Amino acid sequence: MTPNMTKSAVSLNRHDAIIATGVERRVDVKLAVLPLNFSIPPEMIIHTEIVSGDTAQPDLDLTVELVEGTGAFATARLKGATVKRVVLAIRADMAQGKVGRLVLSGRMRRNGVIGEAGITYLAPERLIPRLPGTKKERRERHEATFASKRHQNAA
């Protein structure tokens, strides 16, 4: 409720949603940073050159197009040691014919820079297996399972 609204201008319906008469239903929120957590294809970094020996792996600057065709990009600087560990893990899984998921996380700043960027590789054995059947069939099995459990608990 905004400061210029009176209590009489607000009423609650059966879904407990606020209906304000004569008030625009828009709220603008300004964030200094926007938390990010999204998957990227492992192929994006698989061809990164790995430095061997005791030499430190240089940091990797990763550029991600936010919305295809708009020209809006975000950049993230990833620590070299993390990139080296992740790339080696991806290559080992690919040699066995398996591929996991690569997750980029961080905080989007106003200038298109992803601060506090981190990258995590989820190995294939850590991923939830895809269940057989269509979405509708999986939903029906799920509902049938819980309906039978509710019936058992009621008895």
Image (tube, rainbow, N blue to C red):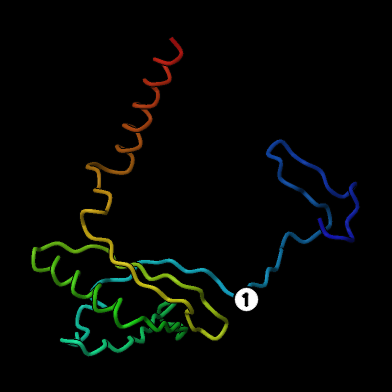
Residue at image point 77% right, 41% down: 12
Taking 50 as reference, is 122 left or right?
right
7 to 136, vertically: above or below: below
- Residue 101, given in percent of the width and then of the height, sits at 27, 64
Identity of the amino acid at label 1? Ala
Comparing 24 with 109, the one in front is 109
Taking 78 as reference, is 17 left or right?
right
Q: How many marks?
A: 1
Residue 2, image quadrant = bottom right
User: Which class describes the residues within 10 Å of circle 1: few (<14), some (14-19), or many (20+)?
Assistant: few
Q: Furthest-top residue in view?
A: 155
Comparing 42 with 133, the one in front is 42
Taking 7 as reference, is 84 left or right?
left
68 to 13, vertically: above or below: below
The residue wearing badge 1 is 32
Q: Furthest-left residue in view?
A: 96
Residue at image point 24% right, 41% down: 133
Q: Quadrant of the C terminus?
A: top left
Residue 61, image quadrant = bottom left
Taking 139 as reference, is 115 left or right?
right
Label 1 sits on a secondary structure element that is loop
- Residue 38, given in percent of the width and then of the height, sits at 40, 67
- Residue 95, given in percent of the width and then of the height, sits at 8, 68
Residue at image point 81% right, 43% down: 11
